[in-house]
Amino acid sequence: MKNTVLGVFAAGFAFSVLAQAEVTDMTADFKVAAGFKLEKIHDVTKDEGSWVGLTEDDKGRLIATDQYGGLFRITVPPLSGGQTKVEALDIAVSGGHGVLWFKGKLYIVVNENVKKNPSQTGVWVVEDKGDGWGTPELLKGIKAGGEHGIHSLVVSPDKEWLYLVSGNYGQLPDLSDSFPAKVWEEDQLLPKNKDGRGHAANVNAPAGWITRFRPDGSDWQLVSMGQRNTYDAAFHDNGELFSYDADMEWDFGMPWYRPTRIIHAVPGTEQGWRNGSGKWPEYYEDSVKPVLNIGPGSPTGVVAGRGFKAPAKYQQAIYALDWTFATIYALHMTPDGASYSVEKEEFVAGAGLPVTDAVIGRDGAMYFATGGRKGVSHLWRVIYTGSEPTAPQPAAKAVHEVRDKLSEYVRNPKSADGALVLENLGSDDRTLRFLAKAALERFPNTDWAPRIAEQENPWTRIMGTMAMARMDGKKHRDLALKILMDTGWESLSLQQKLNWLRSAGLVFIRGGEPSDAERKAVIAKIDKSYPSDERTLNFELARMLCYLQAPGVVARTLKLMDEAPAEQPEPWQDLVERNSRYGKDINEVMKNQPPRTQIHYLYCLRAVKGPWGPGERRRAFNWFREIESRRGGNSYAPAIAMIRQQIYDNGTEDEKKLFAADAKAPAKAPKALPPVQGPGRAWTIEEVVKVTSEGLEGRDKAKGQAMFEASLCSACHKFGTEGGAQGPDLTNLAGRFSAEDLAHSIIEPSEVISDQYEFTEIITHDGKTTVGRVLNEQDEILVIGINPFDFAQQIEISRADIKSIAPSKVSPMPPAMINRLNPDELKDLFAYLLGK
């Protein structure tokens, strides 16, 4: 149902002209693919904001959305050169992340609760009347906000659907249908630890998602789920949908860290993102394996290359934008069974290009924006100037008959051929196995379950029992377990063994814990394989055997930990080394890599109840000395502290007395703060801009670092390899933030609060208000970190006492942190942070 907004959301005149700009050739300043020219065609002014979304109208003009402001139309210059004209559109909708022009209408994905547009997050549409704009209409209100909310829109190849992409903080709207069967759960065999910094602690499946709907706002359907923070997606010429999902950088160094990934988003896709330690390994076949892992980064825009006046391979590429590492990747797709293999190419890259979105223009050029988070924003153009042919290529239709049939069955289960579904549960192709399982789960009942026992193909039995557990775990528990127990273990391939263990785990998770007899039978079936020569199999055997409290599992696991080889370098070393400033912090972690293998085994061992054998618990605790000496992401230290505490908690009373000193890591003495000369003042944004505009070149970086510590910035913010983790990492400010942007963030910290760092406001029935970070959620209490400088200061609040709970609108960062500094000290601090 559409809502027409009156009053503040009234239609107006078309535009007002804000600025014009000349074209500047910037090819020599950045890494650009051979044969292409990079031009900067507009410096976005302060009044125009910071652009994060782009689209093109039917006249070849671009439309941009400011993350915290309004909409702008850009008339681009001819490819031969000229001026860029920017017009502010009189459309009273602001806070858009994504924008799409489609059939004479402008669709806007409003995600930010800015002052001009409070509480109106969702998908908006406004019609271009020719001489002005119609009244904006809310097609669908969606609860969202922050940088993990709703983002971008994509038109389907047949022009019948619009696809909406959302991160894990976007609340799933009411649906008319769901291609992933509505049976999703967290599915953790061992108790999950939530993020040690409290991020996404309340976010469970389906997490990030992709939906589709009709252009009139009707018929909303869930297409894909289980993602962290996919910002955008695109349809390849072959008709298949690809998206670019985010990593959780705070997990860096942990065994459950997942790099940014390219996803082939087949209907019913489950990507297995779960909060905290609960992320599924990519070898779990109740999820879809990414077609490409890229590495650390911040995914933003994704665009298909069709229409690009460039050589054929670039027309048929998908382009994926990484904001953090300032890179546009060209992804070259090659059919690989029912899915694709991907070769990535750095198409455009370089410091100072925090890329946000891109479009292929009607003139055959690529246009992209840089900016975001109120940072300095620009508009750019890429033109092919080489000598290779650029004639438009026909659509690269790569029809895979079985995949296409199974995809249709997932979308429309009434049309399904049950025999084809059953056959492909046992396919040698992982994508077909997943689609067959997804189709099976869409059937109206589970009358098919007994037929799984009649099948001899191990994959059919494994995937079928997965579906049985997920669809009706309690009803089919005994049959599913019998099917698995009757399946020969030794003859299974590595991938089959991994998923036999996953399926058995799902049977216990969904159907109920094993009886003593069942526990002993499962142990007897798999116990002789532990340890094996395969790292991933050892990981899953340890998980299952620790869950089953298998005899001797502690001793064997400790032996594996002692004998494990050193961690191999991550495959994205070239990425972080390419840009020494952006990659410095990650590079330092990689030089001093945490022992992820041992961390995984300790994570499993925390589930084994005491008593352990003589000396075993001491050997486990001894590992923490090395682990805690290594570096990881922001959540590394609290995650390790939780595992340490849980190993202690699972001891007997005698063991707890013996190891009481090992329950927590040794406390570190506080560091003395450098002195401040002053005198300070109550700095305003205008005063900071004036002082810093006098020049930051040649300032004393050592004094700047000292002021970073003296102003308590380092208590919460990491810069390079030093600092805390309660607030955003400031290492990458250079090239993205101006002195004015930084002044706004310091003096008015509540103006923009990232959902990763926001506090929660809890009001209890007695009228008391508590503001802090939710660090742990237990059945009856919430554990709240109340001091932004030290989350070790905690209180507990009973759930029964809570009247309301909501995100705090006040930043945990105090607004006067620089007021002790004199002008010279302030300039040293800004030069240090901005890399001058």
Image (cartoon, helix red, strand yellow):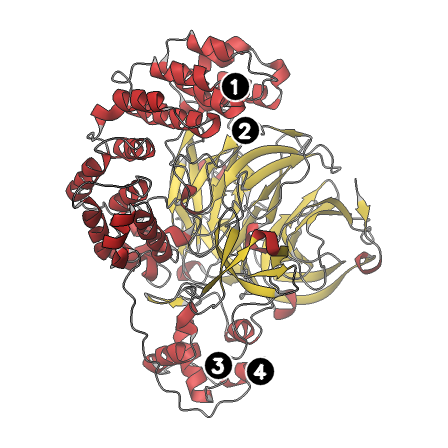
User: Mark 1 vs mark 4: which is more N-terminal?
Assistant: 1
Image vertical order of residue 642 relative to residue 747, above or below: above
Q: Amino acid at mark 2?
A: Gly
Name the residue at the bottom extreme. Answer: 679
Q: Are marks 1 and 4 in contact (CB under 8 Å)?
A: no
User: Mark 4 vs mark 2: which is more N-terminal?
Assistant: 2
Mark 3 = which residue? Answer: 818
Q: Amino acid at mark 4?
A: Thr
Mark 2 = which residue? Answer: 268
Q: Is residue 393 visible?
A: no
Q: Amino acid at mark 1?
A: Lys
Of the residues tagged 1 and 4, which is closer to the observer? Answer: 1
User: Mark 3 vs mark 1: which is more N-terminal?
Assistant: 1
Of the residues tagged 1 and 2, which is closer to the observer? Answer: 1
Mark 1 = which residue? Answer: 475
Return the residue nearer the eye: 555 or 459.
555
**Residue 248 percent location from the top left of the image:** 43, 50
Marks 2 and 3 sit apart, C-alpha to C-alpha, by 51 Å
Indicate the secondary structure of the residue bearing disc 4: loop
Marks 1 and 4 sit apart, C-alpha to C-alpha, by 66 Å
Give the position of the C terminus as an image quadrant: bottom left
Mark 4 = which residue? Answer: 684
Indicate the secondary structure of the residue bearing disc 3: loop
User: Mark 4 vs mark 3: which is more N-terminal?
Assistant: 4
Indicate the secondary structure of the residue bearing disc 1: loop
Marks 3 and 1 sit apart, C-alpha to C-alpha, by 63 Å
**Residue 438 percent location from the top left of the image:** 52, 23
Residue occupying image coordinates x 30% and y 50%: 648
Marks 4 and 3 sit apart, C-alpha to C-alpha, by 10 Å
Q: Is residue 153 visible?
A: yes
Name the residue at the front extreme. Answer: 654
